[in-house]
Amino acid sequence: MYQSLVKPLFDFLFSLILLALLFPILILLLLINSIHFRGNPVFVQSRPGLNGRVFKLFKLKTMREANSFITDDKEEANRVTGFGRLLRKTSLDELPQLLNVLKGDMSIVGPRPLRVEYLSLYNEAQRRRHEVKPGITGLVQVSGASGLSWEKRFELDTKYVNEIGFWTDIKILFLTGFQFFSARRSDALEFERFKGNQQ
């Protein structure tokens, strides 16, 4: 009942209230980003959600445009601007995802939506992360994401799927708030691409 009724209602109301409260900040960041990147301030990318269904994810832009297709993790990390790094450090780049929650593509709490190209690389256990909606924050993010291996991240995603419930989500939200105000977020692992389950 929680996952089918309570959680969607909570997601909608929580994101609506949060978006209303933070709307002036979001507008200011959009204006700054428009100037900073000289154009579109929003980054849009296809990501897989519930049952692997692909949707358009919204984030505030934090990186310069690539001149060509980039496969090197370090080169991709170097595209992040100084202001973009600040947005990532404070998680303010995630604010537009409240719209994804309102649309029903995402939840407030859940496994983070990863790249579409990873879908074919998952084993059966890792694929379970798509049994629930992806989230703006999740168990991985409050467990030291940047210091965790891909194996540990998927293990935590599966743990969340198994233990999903009201108090689990409340605990993750509380820890997320603590990280936000202490600015403890690090996005190092975001640039380390998952290459499959190679032995």
Image (cartoon, grey):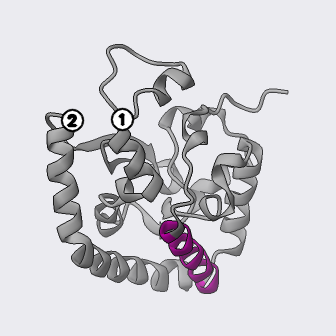
Expressed as whole percent of the image width and height from the top left, the position of residue 171 reads 62, 80
Comes first in the chain, label 2 or label 1? 2
The answer to whether residue 54 is visible is: no
| Residue 193 horizontal side relative to residue 42, left or right | right
The residue located at (74%, 43%) in the rendering is 149
The correct choice, above or below, for 124 with respect to 136 in the image is above
Q: Quadrant of residue 144?
A: bottom right
Q: Quadrant of residue 138?
A: bottom right
The residue located at (57%, 82%) in the rendering is 170
Q: Which residues are magenta?
A: 166-181
Secondary structure at badge 2 equals: loop
Q: What's the residue type where badge 1 is placed?
A: Thr
Q: What's the residue type where badge 2 is placed?
A: Phe
Other residues around mark 2 within 10 Å, as few (<14) / some (14–19) / many (≥20): some
Quadrant in which the N terminus appears: bottom right
Other residues around mark 1 within 10 Å, as few (<14) / some (14–19) / many (≥20): some
Expressed as whole percent of the image width and height from the top left, the position of residue 38 reads 14, 34
Q: Which residue is mark 2?
A: 37
Q: How many marks?
A: 2
